[in-house]
């Protein structure tokens, strides 16, 4: 048998052999390794599927500009139809009383305020019941002075004549077509504001412009028998009396 070996004693003050000593890694080398590892990790994080891609330089954004198209409606030129000017009333024919118009100024060429002598020069009278009163067309039209000066016309009359020269003429009318022979209904339709008042034997209707009156009297027959134009608000009782 081999003799028992004695345990090797290690003295406390004994030093390790040079081979057993290891030099620590230089600090710069360790720092370089750490930096390289960090870069590698950053590269992986940048290219991984879960991260955002790294943009090496900014990409300009492009905005498409859509032009605005404004439709311009076609211009229409309206041509207004010219309104025909009203034709002036024809001048009354002194020889034809149907062309005369009854108005607030008189009847045809026989107008209020005109000297009776001037009327006689334009329309020759056919009769006279007294001075200052002239009858025309067989008394179908009568002109009388107003009595103020005895010379100027103050009353003009259109009346129906039963026989003689005046019976065949067409009497003058107002602008609305009312004259001797018109019914009271026609009169009121043309002049709804005509004012009735009581005369001696009938109801008379009058219209006015504020200064002159036109009186319509039917003598109770239902149709107009006489039309009188005067400045008086009441028709005279008798022009020849």
Image (cartoon, rainbow, N blue to C red):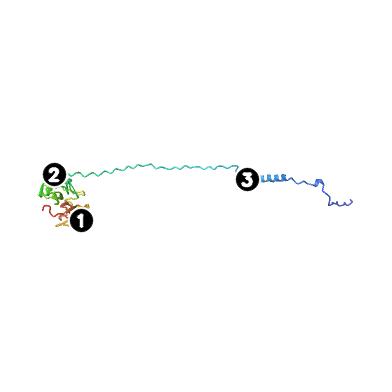
The residue carrying pointer 1 sits among few (fewer than 14), some (14 to 19) or many (20 or more) residues within 10 Å by Cα, namely some
Q: Position of residue 196 (x, y in %)?
A: 19, 56
Q: Which is in the foreground here, disc 3 or disc 1?
A: 1
Q: Nearer the viewer, residue 148 or 19?
A: 148
Q: Mark 1 or 2 closer to N-term? A: 2
The residue carrying pointer 3 sits among few (fewer than 14), some (14 to 19) or many (20 or more) residues within 10 Å by Cα, namely some
Q: Secondary structure at mark 3?
A: helix
Q: Which mark is residue 6?
A: none
Q: Which mark is residue 46?
A: 3
Judged left or right of residue 13, residue 157 is left
Q: Which is in the foreground here, disc 1 or disc 2?
A: 2
Q: Position of residue 80 (x, y in %)?
A: 31, 43
**Residue at 13% over, 44% down:** 121
- The residues bearing labels 2 and 3 have C-alpha atoms spaced at a distance of 126 Å
Q: Position of residue 22 (x, y in %)?
A: 78, 46
Q: Secondary structure at mark 2?
A: helix
Residue placed under numbered mark 2 in the picture? 121
**Residue at 68% over, 45% down:** 35
Q: Which is in the foreground here, disc 2 or disc 3?
A: 2
**Residue at 18% over, 57% down:** 197
Residue placed under numbered mark 1 in the picture? 195
């Amino acid at each position: 048998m081999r003799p028992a070996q004695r345990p090797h004693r290690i003295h406390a003050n004994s030093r390790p052999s040079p081979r057993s000593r290891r030099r620590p890694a230089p600090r710069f080398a360790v720092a370089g390794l750490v930096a390289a590892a960090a870069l590698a990790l950053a590269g992986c994080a940048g290219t991984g599927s879960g991260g955002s891609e790294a943009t090496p330089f900014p990409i300009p954004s492009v905005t498409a500009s859509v032009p605005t198209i404004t439709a311009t409606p076609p211009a229409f030129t309206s041509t207004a139809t010219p309104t025909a000017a009203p034709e002036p009333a024809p001048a009354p024919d002194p020889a034809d009383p149907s062309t005369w118009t009854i108005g607030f100024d008189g009847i045809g060429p026989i107008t209020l305020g005109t000297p009776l002598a001037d009327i006689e020069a334009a329309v020759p009278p056919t009769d006279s019941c007294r001075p200052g009163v002239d009858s025309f067309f067989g008394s179908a039209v009568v002109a009388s002075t107003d009595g103020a000066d005895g010379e100027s016309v103050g009353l003009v009359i259109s009346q129906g004549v039963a026989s003689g020269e005046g019976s065949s003429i067409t009497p003058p009318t107002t602008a609305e077509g009312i004259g001797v022979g018109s019914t009271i209904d026609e009169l009121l339709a043309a002049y709804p504001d005509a004012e009735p008042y009581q005369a001696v034997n009938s109801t008379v209707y009058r219209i006015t412009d504020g200064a002159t009156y036109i009186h319509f009297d039917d003598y109770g027959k239902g149709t107009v028998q006489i039309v009188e134009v005067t400045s008086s608000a009441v028709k005279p009782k008798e022009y020849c009396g």
